Image: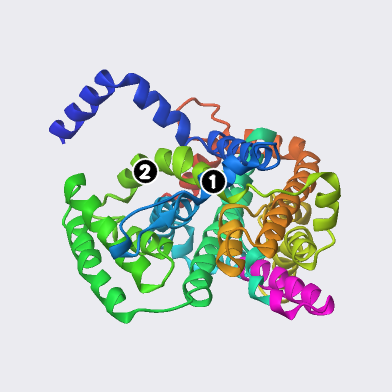
Amino acid sequence: MINRLSRRLLTRGSWPETQRLAEILRTETVGGVLLLFAAGAALVWANSPWSQGYDALSEFTFGPESLHLQLSLSAWAADGLLAIFFFVVGLELKREFVAGDLRDPSRAALPILAAVGGMAVPAAIFIGVNLAAGHPENVVGWAVPTATDIAFAVAVLAVLSTHLPSALRTFLLTLAVVDDLLAIIVIAFFYTDHLSPGALALALVPGGLFALAVQRGMRHWWLLVPLAVATWALVHASGVHATVAGVVLGFTVPVLGRHASAEDFEHRLRPVSAGFAVPVFAFFAAGVTVGGWSGFGSALTHPVTYGVIAGLVIGKPLGVWGTAFLLAKFTRANLDDDLAWRDVLGVSLLAGIGFTVSLLIGELAFGHGTPAGDDVKIGVLVGSVVAGVLASAVLLSRNAAYRRIHEMETADHDLDGVPDVYASRQDRTEPGA
């Protein structure tokens, strides 16, 4: 422990700028702003007189062809860099299932089932819109409006300076965690074009060695990184989307016990994910040429575009809020005393901000650079903006109430470092109280 502390102090002393930058990138607001900036830059470049340069950069290909890794830059961003993002997601999921709110099924039942409803209703709306428009071939994109971008959603909350009460924040985070898990399952089972069992079986070798190493407390980058890359490459060669490898590897990292390292891994990799991997993916994924206002208006009339928008703006809040309301009405599930149904509506609207995973599923469903793929991008961008604006209006209307709840939850009148609300709970549980 002393040696580890010494290394940290030496690192901070030697690289203060790097340490400071990493801490900045760990903040949720900065990650969301970088994501927004990257997407905006891609849209501007793709619709400028120099749009051919953007296309050439996106399609620039490199990598070993013998290993099936001769990919374009946009594919490297979607298949490679997003694996880092999904590794962090895997760490978060493991922590929530082992030591977080999801370890108690009764407490997590309401947001878990609300997340399921929040994926089913948008998918049904998208399918219904495209079938009604006479385009059954578009149904393959049913999962596009089902995913929530938690980085963007939390960034919106941070920008609004909304003092979310702990119960509502727990609801939002549980909702997002389950949403991520379901999106990963959807990608693995519904968007795998071909499957090579041999490559998938071989991936178990480096993946198993990675799991064995982290379970025994090994944290040497020169050992873990090659094993992780080998696992990723073999999963990619198998036909399963390579980001699934990131999630699986994240699940192998121990959360509790003597060799627990999930928190340390997440602390180190979150700046790389939020500050580089996700913004670069957004830059290559969001650049769609809309052809001016006339082209943009035309795209809004396409069933894929308005199907995605309807799924995000209408389907998400209807699925999340409606499921939670029905559960509270017909079961023993109840909201926290500090929350109103308007609060759940605000979070449900916020869940309609779909970006990273929605764009990824759009590329998997329709391909990169196709007309339907471009419609997905426009639908995701417009739907996310509308959902964010509506959520902001609802949550800001409750900001005064949130501030009072926040002050009550953090009040510490005796200055003992323990909020009064927790101290009173402890007094009631002590013997003789």
Q: Amino acid at mark 2?
A: Leu
**Mark pair 2, 1: CA separation:** 30 Å
Which residue is disc 1 drawn over? 56
Q: Judge left or right: residue 152 versus residue 289.
A: left
Image spot of residue 366 (x, y percent): 61, 67
Question: Does the stretch in magenta take in 431?
Answer: no
403 and 28: which one is in front?
Answer: 28
Residue range corresponding to the magenta coloring:
114-138
**Whether residue 30 can be seen here:** yes
Q: Main secondary structure of the magenta part?
A: helix
250 and 276: which one is in front?
Answer: 276
Which label belongs to residue 269? 2
**Whether residue 431 can be seen here:** no
Q: Amino acid at mark 1?
A: Ala
Is label 2 in a helix, a strand or a loop? helix
Residue at horizontal 78 percent and vertical 53 percent from the top: 342
391 and 44: which one is in front?
Answer: 44
Is label 1 in a helix, a strand or a loop? helix
Q: How many marks?
A: 2
**Where's the N terminus, which quadrant?**
top left
Among the two numbered marks 2 and 1 on one chain, the one whose residue lies closer to the N terminus: 1
Dot 2, how many residues are within 10 Å of its Cα: few (below 14), some (14-19), or many (20+)?
some
Image spot of residue 338 (x, y percent): 69, 49
Residue at horizontal 37 percent and vertical 66 percent from the top: 236
Image spot of residue 46 (x, y percent): 66, 43
* Picture layout, residue 64 above or below residue 60: below
